[in-house]
Amino acid sequence: MDYLFDACAFIAFLNEEEGSDIVAKLLTQAGDGTGRVFITSIQALEVYYDRIYVKGREYADTFLENLYASSVIILHDISRYVVKEAGRFKTSYSMSLGDTILVATALCNGATIVTCDHLELKPVERQENIPFLWIRPQF
């Protein structure tokens, strides 16, 4: 199965928050070749700047180098299909631009979104045919 990480899932893992065990399991599967994990460059950017705020630039730079060297597949290109779907999501839901790219990428690539962002993404799950893996319950 293919999993597309939202930034919040990766940040939860890095901060050892609730749900980090689910992320760790998926990363292990990616490492041993029994699953595939993706992150878009937009979500990687979100994690990177979060690390700058939380731990400083040097730590963030090291994190980014390790991410690029890991088994996580970073999706850099945004196809015209993703652009079109992201535009549709942006005008249909109250979502950040980063989340529209995430959801459109998952839709266009048949991936399951791994997230904890119930606020922005729960309405999408209710209306769209996109699978979600919630790493923690909605509060």
Image (spheres, helix red, strand yellow):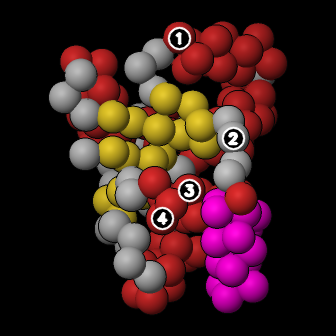
- What are the residue bounds of the magenta stretch? 81-97
Give amino acid for label 2. Answer: Asp
The quarter of the picture where residue 40 lies is top right
Q: Which residue is pictured at 68% across the width and 52% down the height?
A: 79
Query: Which label's residue is closer to the chain start, 3 or 1?
Result: 1
Task: Report the mark closest to the observer, 1 or 4.
Answer: 4
Q: Residue at x 33, y 34 (%)?
A: 36
Q: Residue at x 47, y 38 (%)?
A: 38
Mark 4 vs 3: CB contact within 8 A:
yes
Q: Of the residues shown, which amino acid type is indicated by label 4?
A: Leu
Residue assigned mark 2: 77
Residue assigned mark 1: 69
Q: Is 136 placed above or below 20 here? A: below
Q: Nearer the viewer, residue 127 or 47?
A: 127
* Comes first in the chain, label 2 or label 1: 1
> What's the distance in space between the residues labelled 1 and 4, CA to CA?
26 Å
Q: Helix or strand or loop: what does disc 3 sit on?
A: helix
State which quadrant residue 28 falls in.
top left
Residue 77 coordinates in the image, percent (x, y): 69, 41
- The type of residue carrying mark 1 is Ala
Which type of secondary structure does the marked residue at label 4 adopt?
helix
Q: CA distance from mark 2 to mark 4?
A: 15 Å
According to the image, label 4 marks what residue? 107
What distance separates the C-alpha of mark 4 from that of mark 3? 5 Å
Mark earlier in primary sequence (1, 4) = 1
Q: Which residue is mark 3?
A: 105
For residue 34: magenta? Answer: no
Marks 3/1: CA–CA distance: 22 Å
